[in-house]
Image (cartoon, grey):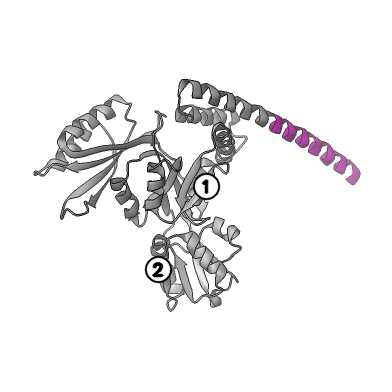
Amino acid sequence: MPTTKNTEISEIRKQIDTIDNTIVDLLKSRIECAREIGKLKDVSKRAKWDPLRERQIYERLVEKSGDIFPEQALKSIFHEIITTCRLSQKREEVAYLGPEATFSHLAGVKYFGHSAAYKPMESIDDIFAEVEKSRTDYGIVPVENSIEGAVFSTLDSFMKYKVQICGEVRLEISHNLVCRSGNIEDIQTVASHSQPLAQCREWLRKNMPSIPTLPVFSTGAAAQMAANNPNIGAIASSLAIKTYELQIVVKGIEDYRGNTTRFLVIGRQSPEYSGKDRTSLLIGTADRPGALNEILTVLSEESINLAKIESRPIKGKHWKYMFFLDMMGHIEEEHIKRGCDQIKTLCSYFEWLGSYPGSSETSAEL
């Protein structure tokens, strides 16, 4: 009887091997097709990335699979296939807040896949500068957190540099306390970026009340410190744990569940219409009563859904502000274009930051 069962298992494994070999052969054919499309796009000067086509591929595959293959797993597999094939046309370089294994690095991998070339930078300001000066193709920057709000260094950089928003990625975050030994007794200081420290402040107060915290410029830097010093603990990403060979002390120390960080992909040209887009503006209002209300009235009259509005002070001008607006829709849509044209006439400053595909949230332990 066992021999029969082993024979059956062996035969099924042979079928799996045949299927795997077929998948590899088909992947080779797919990447060759992608390269041919890349050559044709070069001739016609078309953008390498077509977000509408990409979204249609996902929808078709999910429909074809039905309930047989889990939807999220199917999208994850084909995301890596699609990005790898696209990058075979031209390997994109992506600047992120370094060092390796930061939040931004992980968000970049989620968005661009593993085949892109990743370039760590020392600050968010540096990322914007690299993109503006064409020293890198894209940058990925955090713009807001569902608990702590806006990342002001990113908003301020939009006021300094001429770049466009090309996409967004959202990650549901679960924070980990890590160190070299994995023992909480060894930790004499907890290091991390200011945002994760703020997102875990209650847990740290209750569980490590006498342990000081040390804000550093990134979670990757905190992980590096923990790897080099047995008495430093870090709040860092799952990618950092693997990269720096750290041990988990406590998982999930964030104060609120459902904590999500939104990242923006910046580049020099926004993508075409995808059908599920956002449009971002940077505006300065005229110096008169009701100026902001006039803009909001335009959005209402054009039935434009305002997803976000954030103000930032203008450096060197006391009590003067710029406003960041996120709207649902693409600039190519008539009501969005019409609304933006009207807003432009009401503003002392108007800049279209980009129209780009909106992101569905993706869970990740950071």
- Image coordinates of residue 10 in percent, x first then y, are 84, 40
Label 1: how many Cα within 10 Å (few below 14, some 14–19, many 20+): many
Label the magenta part by its dominant secondary structure: helix
| Towards the viewer: 293 or 311 | 311
Kindly identify which residue carries mark 1. 118
| Towards the viewer: 70 or 326 | 326
In this picture, is 359 found above or below 151?
above
Mark 2–mark 1 Cα distance, whole angstroms, equals 34 Å
Residue 1 visible somewhere in the drawing: no
Kindly identify which residue carries mark 2. 202
What residue sits 56% from the left and 34% below the top? 82
- Image coordinates of residue 286 in percent, x first then y, are 13, 41
What residue sits 41% from the left and 51% below the top? 261
Quadrant into which the N terminus falls? top right
What residue sits 60% from the left and 58% below the top? 242
Residue 21 in the magenta stretch? The answer is: yes
In this picture, is 139 found above or below 217?
above
Front tag of 2 and 1 = 1
